[in-house]
Amino acid sequence: MKKAKIFQRLLIGVIILIALFFILKIYFTNQNKLKVASVSVFSEMKNNVFLNFLNQSSGWLNDLFHFNRIRYQAKNLEEENDNLLFHLSQFKDLEEENLALKEAFNLKKEKGWHLLPAQVILIDSTGFSGQFWIDQGQNSGLKSGMNVILENQVLIGILKECFKDYCRGESIFAPQTKIGVENVESHVLAILEKDNRGRYLLKLVPQEANILVGDLLITSQENTNFLKGLLVAKVQEIIPSSNVLKEYILEPLFTKNQLSTVFVITDFIPSNAALY
């Protein structure tokens, strides 16, 4: 039994040696071919990885440049839009100025007034003093005391001090304003007065006066500082009072934010140039 086992082991060993011999022979015979195939496979894998990296990098760079180009175009469009809005604003200002000049020309023909257009260059933003400045002065023939209006005959105020190239004026928003006015509808005479609370009241109104909400008030003949017939305010509210007399609350016909192009009536200079 022992001899049989030894023989089997020897036989298996011989068979394994013979198999290894043939395997090694096949390997050494095809060694060069296997090397070429291995190098080819490795090169192909390497090239594929490199190409994938290049493709991904190229795609990322294209996206980056495309995004930057879009952002640049958006910035240009935004700047162009701002420029268009600026020019549109300029055209709108010119249109409003042309309309104002047209209305002033019609007013000049109707009333026979000599009007000089001017631009408001500065205004008291608080509104407490009622002061404003225009870009015309003594070189244009302007003098203190001349009335300043809008193109629709609305009274702005009066010039208080003039220099070579500009004038300082005071509007009806100045404190303690008092103006003689006349009701356009009923021709009732009264006094427009600004009180300490900033309200515009109608004073010295006759008891029998027929004055209604919405009535317009113009400067009356009794004024020494203002030309007759300029629009000043309208009746906003009527408050009954216990002493029979009514209290009339008035509303000016312009706001300080409307002051842009104004007109100076150059052919009317009051003898007393002091305002109000």
Image (cartoon, rainbow, N blue to C red):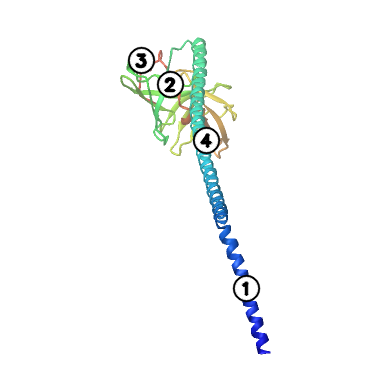
| Amino acid at the residue labelled 1 | Ile
Report if the CB atoms under discs 4 and 2 are less than 8 Å apart: no
Label of residue 33 in the image: none
x%, y% of residue 189? 51, 23
Q: CA distance from mark 4 to mark 2?
A: 47 Å
Q: CA distance from mark 3 to mark 1?
A: 125 Å
Q: Looking at the image, is mark 4 or mark 2 earlier in the sequence?
A: 4
| Amino acid at the residue labelled 3 | Ser
Instruction: Answer few, some or many: residues within 10 Å of disc 2's Cα (few below 14, many 20 plus, some between 14 and 19).
Output: many
Report if the CB atoms under discs 3 and 2 are less than 8 Å apart: no
Label of residue 74 in the image: 4
x%, y% of residue 260? 45, 25
Q: Kindly indicate the quadrant of the structure image that contains residue 262.
A: top left
Q: Looking at the image, is mark 3 or mark 4 earlier in the sequence?
A: 4
Question: Is the residue 151 above or below the residue 59 in the image?
Answer: above
Residue at which label 3 appears? 140
Q: Looking at the image, is mark 3 or mark 2 earlier in the sequence?
A: 3
Q: Is residue 12 left or right of residue 218?
A: right
Residue at which label 2 appears? 148
Report if the CB atoms under discs 3 and 1 are less than 8 Å apart: no
Question: Is the residue 156 above or below the residue 42 in the image?
Answer: above
Q: Looking at the image, is mark 3 or mark 1 earlier in the sequence?
A: 1
| Amino acid at the residue labelled 2 | Val
Secondary structure beneath label 4: helix
Query: Is residue 232 shown to the viewer in this render?
Result: no
Q: Looking at the image, is mark 4 or mark 1 earlier in the sequence?
A: 1
